[in-house]
Image (cartoon, coloured by chain):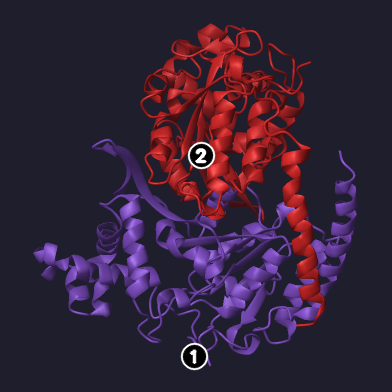
Chain colours: A red, B purple
Amino acid sequence: MNTVRPFLGSLFGTVLLVTNLLPAVAQEVLPSWNDGAAKTRIVDFVKATVTQGGNAYVAPEDRVAVFDNDGTLWSEQPYYFQLGFMLDRVKTLAPEHPEWTTKEPFKSILEGDLKGIAKGGEKGIVELGMVTHAGMTSDQFTTIVTDWFASARHPKTGKPFNEMTYLPMRELLDYLRDNGFKTFIVSGGGVEFMRPITEKAYGIPPEQVVGSTIVTEYDVVGDIPVLKRLPKIDFIDDGPGKPVGINKFIGRRPIFVAGNSDGDYEMLRWVTSAKHSGLAMIVHHTDAKREYAYDRDSAFGKLSKALDEAQQRNWLVVDMKDDWKKVYAFEQ
Amino acid sequence: MNTVRPFLGSLFGTVLLVTNLLPAVAQEVLPSWNDGAAKTRIVDFVKATVTQGGNAYVAPEDRVAVFDNDGTLWSEQPYYFQLGFMLDRVKTLAPEHPEWTTKEPFKSILEGDLKGIAKGGEKGIVELGMVTHAGMTSDQFTTIVTDWFASARHPKTGKPFNEMTYLPMRELLDYLRDNGFKTFIVSGGGVEFMRPITEKAYGIPPEQVVGSTIVTEYDVVGDIPVLKRLPKIDFIDDGPGKPVGINKFIGRRPIFVAGNSDGDYEMLRWVTSAKHSGLAMIVHHTDAKREYAYDRDSAFGKLSKALDEAQQRNWLVVDMKDDWKKVYAFEQ
């Protein structure tokens, strides 16, 4: 031990002390959220969580926050973006599959008949998923997805899909992380579909993305090890699968959860039944002008049971229209 | 923007610059490693990885390091510690199972006949695993495991199992983390068996532990959501399962890997076949006095193929006897 370190330690301490006092003065918290009950409840929860000695204090290592993706962090209308990927992928692969011109659901996709996609039934949809997500290596799939995000555009806004994220939710992710939370995505979407973009879009690294998986298999081609994506579902991270996925991948009970549909119901229950006081929030899509307005009757992101029970379970329902100043960063 | 921040930024920069220069002077790196080729290679690899502008520089977010657990971070003799847990668990549960006095492998366990455990065949071993690992909730299992670690003792050293970790490897974990690496366990062991102790033993949080899993199911008992552990294997994180597990749970290709047996062979291959220059190391158990000496003929941690190919694949073989000053922290 030399004498330089204690000196620096003390200097460091002073600097940290001063800088810790700065944020409250220098910047507003959650600037795209309107002042109101929702914002207040979030801020109160976070403040209580980090207040040492308080009843609701939670040690930094237990500050785990989980977020659904579709409809919670980015839009899911007019269809899940991953379905958009599938539709485009079918068009790209069509020249190699002349049989698709007469076979559902490919026929409807190639004819631009979105409503006809269901004609092939559930079996057809699963086949659609497998054809577009399997039969290549993991590295190849990552390249395909990355290229798609670079070129594909949302049918309504014309924006790249990875810009269709909700600014207030990105601020919430930052705010939680600034307060020592570790943030995770827990989505029904495919994990290898999300991972190429979550770091840039949300500041969430690949290892903090939990999602549905298909079976992959180790193989050696030539002398090169590869992971082959097989046309077989491994795990569906939706509904009751979400608490299972959290337990499997994360291994801790979160203290914060955000969702927007009945697919998040069990996850909301799981988080808020723990001993510590957690916060569960539901993003309610009420803004037909800036985004979409839907809940009970939507094919994507149906919200009914979770909405019915929100009050009795003390879940925070966020009203997009009233609680958010902006929805997307690209808005004027 | 006020004028305090740029000033503090500049002050901070100076302080960081000075403190960054300190470690090399103030403390020895990897103190429990003997000076020699192994230590030099590790240090050279880490220095090259963090040297900006160098050929082998790797951005912090891609500094992923994975470690096998049994035989790599802690001992695996005279048997896997998780097997020790199973044996003790059978003894605890025996009063509720009078049929075990005549049924293998339980009969042999209760009679203390370790060699007889195999009498029930593979089916018996799987049943042993299921009886001791399923039929309770995840929370209950965590409590059972935590209690076991608090009381169980290693048959040779008499130490708690979670103190049977290798000091040089814990130093290596710290050293990698000090240099911006994110460290993960990728083990054939059960993920819910390891997670209760990995934070304290290795500084590795639950969400950075990849392991074998059994099927869990969400259920609501009374009004309380629980995760039930079912007697069915979900995923075996061993051999070719390790690259699959890394891809599924972590989603990035590591640049550092440590293993000790042929169960790590595919993981070693997977890491060192990437484009960037990764480092793969094998812990070779050569120290019969301080630990155990074994490789090709061991029932636990058999090392044969990976050892044969180590030189041609440029994998670093660490000789426990020659390369480590100490094996365990509790040694005099």
Amino acid type assigned to the residue bearing label 2 in the image: Phe
Kindly tell me whether residue B31 is visible in this rendering.
yes
* A144 sits left or right of B320 in the view: right
Please state which of the two labelled residues, at mark 2 or mark 1, is closer to the viewer. 2
Residue at which label 1 appears: B288
* B210 sits left or right of B281 in the view: left
Q: Please, is residue B27 above or below residue B147 in the view?
A: below
Q: CA distance from mark 2 to mark 1?
A: 49 Å
Quarter of the image with the C terminus of chain A is top right
Q: Which mark is residue A236?
A: none
Q: Secondary structure under badge 2?
A: strand
Q: In front: B65, or B278? A: B65
Label 2: few (<14), some (14–19) or many (≥20) C-alpha neighbours in 10 Å: many
Residue at which label 2 appears: A256
Q: Are marks 2 and 1 in contact (CB under 8 Å)?
A: no
Q: Where is residue A256 drawn, in percent x and y?
A: 51, 39
Give me the residue at 52% from left, 32% from top.
A258
Q: Where is residue B32 drawn, in percent x and y?
A: 64, 84
Chain letter belonging to callout 2: A
Q: Please, is residue A137 above or below residue B244 in the view?
A: above
Q: Where is residue B268 drawn, in percent x and y?
A: 62, 63
Q: Please, is residue B167 above or below residue B218 in the view?
A: below
Amino acid type assigned to the residue bearing label 1 in the image: Ala
Q: Where is residue A318 drawn, in percent x and y?
A: 54, 22
